[in-house]
Image: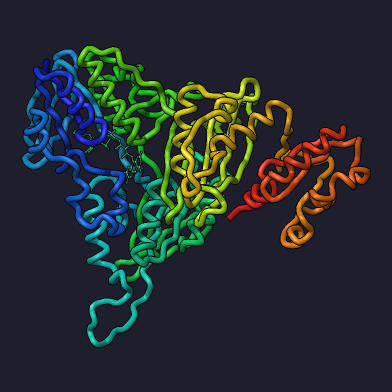
Amino acid sequence: MKVVIVGGVAGGASCAARLRRLDESAEILVVERGPYISYANCGLPYYVGGLIPRESKLVLADAALFRAQLNVEVRTLCEAVSIDPEARTVQLRDVTSGEVTTESYDKLVLSPGASPIRPPLPGIDLPGIFVVRTVPDVHVIREWMEGHVTDPSGLDTYTGSQTVLPARRAVVVGGGFIGLEMAENLVHLGLDVTLVQRGPQLMSPMDPEMARYVERHVARNGVKLALSENVTGFRQAAGTSLEVLTASGKAIPADIVVMGIGVRPEVGLAKTAGLAIGERGGILVDDQMRTSVPDIFAVGDAIEVRDHVTGAQLHVPLAGPANRQGRIAAEVIAGRDSRFRGTQGTAIVGLFGGAAAWTGVSEKTLRRIGDTDYEKIFIYPNSHAGYYPGAQYLAMKILFRKSDGRLLGAQAVGLDGVDKRIDAFAIALQFGATVYDLEEAELTYAPQFGSAKSPVNFAGMVAADVLRGDMPVAHWDDEHPFLLDVRQPAELAVEQVPGVVNIPLPELRGRLDELPRDREIHVICRSGQRAYYATRILLQNGFEARNISGGMLSHATLSAG
Ligand SMILES: Cc1cc2nc3c(=O)[nH]c(=O)nc-3n(C[C@H](O)[C@H](O)[C@H](O)COP(=O)(O)OP(=O)(O)OC[C@H]3O[C@@H](n4cnc5c(N)ncnc54)[C@H](O)[C@@H]3O)c2cc1C
C-alpha cells in the first residue's frame, strides 16, 4: 500500500509516524511545501520574543530522522498542486526548480493546515507587515526587527551622536491566540505594543465578562488595547515606519505590524479533487477522517469538525485535534475502527505569567443557537490553599444543563492553576459528566497545589446547590426586585451597587424583620460565598432569595476595559 501525505507538520507527521508503527510494509511519502517538517508552530511567537533562542529548537524532526527511524520518505520544498482521484495520482511541484511530477497513491492524506488571513486592505503589502505561520515567517520577522528597528535594550550601537532612541512601536492586529502571544513577546522585547481588535472583546471564544480579565491583565502588562477598532488600511510613514489606519479615523504608528486576525482552511488542493467543502470553509470528513472521495483522508486545520456539545460543524484550528486526527486517519488506513469524537475547542493561552483557558461551549454560543436549557455560575476559588504562600484567585465560569446537570462548558482566567482545572473539566465534559460528578471528583491535593475541595469540586458543589434548589442564583443582567448586600460597611465604602440595603452577614439573623417578604431578595457579597450563607438563612426563614453569582467580583467585569 502506498500512502502519500500532504503537509508534514502536526497532522501529517503524526499520521506518518502512527501509520509506520502499525504497518511496516506501507510505502509512506510525506510532501511538504516548506523547508521543514514537524516544526513547532506553537513555539513561533516565543522564538520572536527570544525565549526560544535558536530556530533549530523549533524543528522537532527532519527528513533524515523520518527516514532513519520510521522508513518514511520526506520531500520538503515539494508542493502538491493537484489531485486526480480517478487515476489516484497527485501532481507534485518542486518548489525550487518548478518541475512537476506525478505520484500515484493508494491512500492520500491531506493535512495542509490553514493559512493566515491577509485581508486585501490598502497597503497590506507594505514592507513591515507580517503574519506568523511558519519558521520562515518568524525568521523574516526577526530579521526585520534586527535590521529595521532599534536594539531591544533601547540603545542602538553608539555612533557618537545618539543616546537613547525613541521607543519602538508594534501594532498587532487581532486579539486571538496568535495576536496575544505576539503582543506579549513584543512587549518582552521592549516594544511599545498596540493591539487592535475589531470586536469589543479579546479572545472571542470566551464570554465577554471573562475576556475582561484577559483585557485588564494584558493592559496592566503594557499592551495598549484598541478594542472595537476596525483596521481599514496601512500607510507608509517616515523611513520604514507605517501607520495603521482604522475606521474611527486613527492612524496608529508602527515600526512593525503583525496580522493575527485568524486563519482560513487551505482547501485549494482539495478542490482540485472535487472534495466536499463545508459551510465553514473546511474539508468535510466523517468521524474516520474520510473525505467525500474514497481513499482521500483529511485532518487538522484544513477540515471542519463536529462540536462535541452542540453537534454543529466548526473550524477549530488547534494542535491537539490535528495530532489526534492524523493518528486516527493512520489507524483507519491500517484497518482499525478508530473514530474522532468531535471537538470541545479546549484551549489555553499564556498571558504574561497567567493564563486564560476554556473547554466546551460558551454562553454566547448557547444564546446564538437559542439554547435556553442552561444555567451558569461564577466562582473565584484560590489556586491553592489560601494559607499557603502564593495562592492566587481564579476567575471561573461554568455552564451546565438546567435539566440534567450535564457540564456544557468551563472558562477560567488566573495567574496559577488555570490549565489543570480546565483539563479536568475537559475530560469530564468529554465523558458527559454532570455537575454532580464534579462534586465527587477525586483530585490531587496538598496545600501548595490545590485545596481539599478543589476548584473543580467547588464548581460542582456550587452548581449542584443551584440545581437542587439549595442556592437559587441570579445574575447581574437579571432584574433585581430587592438587593441585599451582606458585606461589611467598610467593603461597601470601596465599591457598592446603588440602591442596596446593607445588612452584614453576622447581623442578618437578628435583622430579618427589615427584609421584604413580598419580593425576591437578591443577595450580594464579594465573591458569592457569604451571599450563599445569607441565602440559606433567608430561604430557611421563609424568604424568597437568590445569590447573585460571583457577587461584586462578577460585577466588576460588566464594565468594558
Ligand atoms: C503561531 C502559532 C501558534 C500556535 N499555537 C498553538 C497553541 O498554543 N496550541 C494549539 O493547540 N495550537 C496552536 N496553533 C495551531 C496549531 O499549530 C495547528 O492547529 C496545527 O499545526 C494544525 O496542524 P495541521 O497539520 O493541520 O497544519 P500545519 O501544522 O499548519 O501543517 C500544514 C503543513 O502543510 C504544508 N502544506 C500546505 N499545503 C501544501 C501542499 N499543497 N503541498 C505540500 N505541503 C503543503 C504547509 O506548508 C504546512 O507546513 C498555533 C499556530 C500558530 C501558527
In depth, the one of 380 and 325 nearer the eye is 380
Compared with 38, 109 (above or below) is above
| Colour treatment of the image | rainbow
Name the quadrant where ligand 1 sits: top left
Q: Where is residue 431 in the image (x, y as percent from the top left)?
A: 47, 22
- The single residue placed furthest to the front in the displayed view is 446
Tell me if residue 414 can be seen: yes
Q: Where is residue 368 in the image (x, y as percent from the top left)?
A: 58, 30
Task: Describe residue 84's horizontal placement relative to residue 490 as left or right.
Answer: left
Quadrant for residue 365, please give it.
top right
Q: Quadrant of the C terminus?
A: bottom right
Q: Where is residue 221 in the image (x, y as percent from the top left)?
A: 47, 61
Compared with 38, 221 (above or below) is below
Residue at 35 percent of width and 30 percent of height: 321
Q: Position of residue 522 (x, y in %)?
A: 79, 41
Task: Describe residue 543's horizontal placement relative to residue 459 as left or right.
Answer: right
Compared with 475, 47 (above or below) is below
In depth, the one of 499 and 160 nearer the eye is 499
Compared with 79, 254 (above or below) is below
Quadrant for residue 251, please give it.
bottom left
Q: In which quarter of the image is the N terminus?
A: top left
Residue at 31 percent of width and 72 percent of height: 153
Residue at 31 percent of width and 16 percent of height: 338
Quadrant for residue 157, please give it.
bottom left
In depth, the one of 313 and 80 nearer the eye is 313
Q: How many marks?
A: 0
Tell me if residue 198 can be seen: no
Task: Describe residue 457's horizontal placement relative to residue 251 as left or right.
Answer: right
